[in-house]
């Protein structure tokens, strides 16, 4: 019999497999063992087992401790809603995946420019499988670009506003460059376009 946390993890992992087109590195027995450990920690702390975000966070941390960093990142990125499939009229038949930069900053707690770029790079490395079927054709939509920049630099004076706008442009460019590098390394015919959804 599968525990409620086990059922939740299986649903999240099925979503990841569907999104990436690849099976996760976990086996069913590993999922149930992971679920049991997470459920025990949450029960002892008096936490609600239906808190999907907390289940994802604890499961990801546990996977990292067990040495499966790739599965931990994948679970955190897709399971937390940091990156989600989306449909927009402008994307046509091309896959559109939306990265919520506000969640990236909140989830990682990073407030330093270089740490944000390192986290962003790791997220893009994690999600690239979603474009494998299309040989890189598709789009990455970035949500909350401006508000993330404003959170980092503030908007109190003209100098900070200028720096905030420059940082927003740099985020877009870094994502574009990273996806282009990934497309080259994977021998794709295309690389995903980067779109600011603010």
Image (cartoon, rainbow, N blue to C red):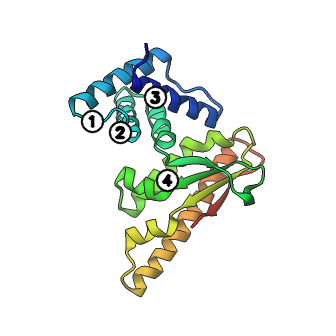
Question: Where, quadrant-wise, is the C terminus in this rendering?
Answer: bottom right
Instruction: Tell me which label, 3 or 4, sits earlier in the chain.
Output: 3
Tag 3 secondary structure: helix
In front: mark 1 or mark 3? 1
In front: mark 4 or mark 2? 2
- Asked if the residue under mark 3 is in contact with the one under mark 2, i.e. CB atoms within 8 Å, the reply is no
| Residue 94 x, y percent position in the rendering | 75, 50
Instruction: Give the distance between the C-alpha atoms of the residues marked 1 and 3, in whole angstroms.
Output: 17 Å
| Residue 73 x, y percent position in the rendering | 46, 38
Residue at numbered disc 3: 9
Tag 1 secondary structure: loop
Q: Is residue 183 left or right of residue 159?
A: right
Q: Is residue 14 left or right of residue 160?
A: right
- Asked if the residue under mark 1 is in contact with the one under mark 2, i.e. CB atoms within 8 Å, the reply is yes
- Asked if the residue under mark 4 is in contact with the one under mark 3, i.e. CB atoms within 8 Å, the reply is no
- Tell which of 109 and 40 is nearer to you: 40
Instruction: Give the distance between the C-alpha atoms of the residues marked 3 and 4, in whole angstroms.
Output: 24 Å
Total labels: the figure holds: 4
> Would you identify the image quadrant in which residue 51 lies?
top left
Residue at numbered disc 1: 47
Instruction: Give the distance between the C-alpha atoms of the residues marked 2 and 3, in whole angstroms.
Output: 12 Å
Local crowd size for mark 3, using a 10 Å CA cut-off: few (<14), some (14–19), many (≥20): many
In front: mark 2 or mark 1? 1
- Tell which of 103 and 89 is nearer to you: 89
Residue at numbered disc 2: 54
> Would you identify the image quadrant in which residue 1 lies?
top left
Instruction: Give the distance between the C-alpha atoms of the residues marked 4 and 2, in whole angstroms.
Output: 21 Å
Local crowd size for mark 2, using a 10 Å CA cut-off: few (<14), some (14–19), many (≥20): some
Instruction: Tell me which label, 4 or 1, sits earlier in the chain.
Output: 1
Residue at numbered disc 4: 120
């Amino acid at each position: 019999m599968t525990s409620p946390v086990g059922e939740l993890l299986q649903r999240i992992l099925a979503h990841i497999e569907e999104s990436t087109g690849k099976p996760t590195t976990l086996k069913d027995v590993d999922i149930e063992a992971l679920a049991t450990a997470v459920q025990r920690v949450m029960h002892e702390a008096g936490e609600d087992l239906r808190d999907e975000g907390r289940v994802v966070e604890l499961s990801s941390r546990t996977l990292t401790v067990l040495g499966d960093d790739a599965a931990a990142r994948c679970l955190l990125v897709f399971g937390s809603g940091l990156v989600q499939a989306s449909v927009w009229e402008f994307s046509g038949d091309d896959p559109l995946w939306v990265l919520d930069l506000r969640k990236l900053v909140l989830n990682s707690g990073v407030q330093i420019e270089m740490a944000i770029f390192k986290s962003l790079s790791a997220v893009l490395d994690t999600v690239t499988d979603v474009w494998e079927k299309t040989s890189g054709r598709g789009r990455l939509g970035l949500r909350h670009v401006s508000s993330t920049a404003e959170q980092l630099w503030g908007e109190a004076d003209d100098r900070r506003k200028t720096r905030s706008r420059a940082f927003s442009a740099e985020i877009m460019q870094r994502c574009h460059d990273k996806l282009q590098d990934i497309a080259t390394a994977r021998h794709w015919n295309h690389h995903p376009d980067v779109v600011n959804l603010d």
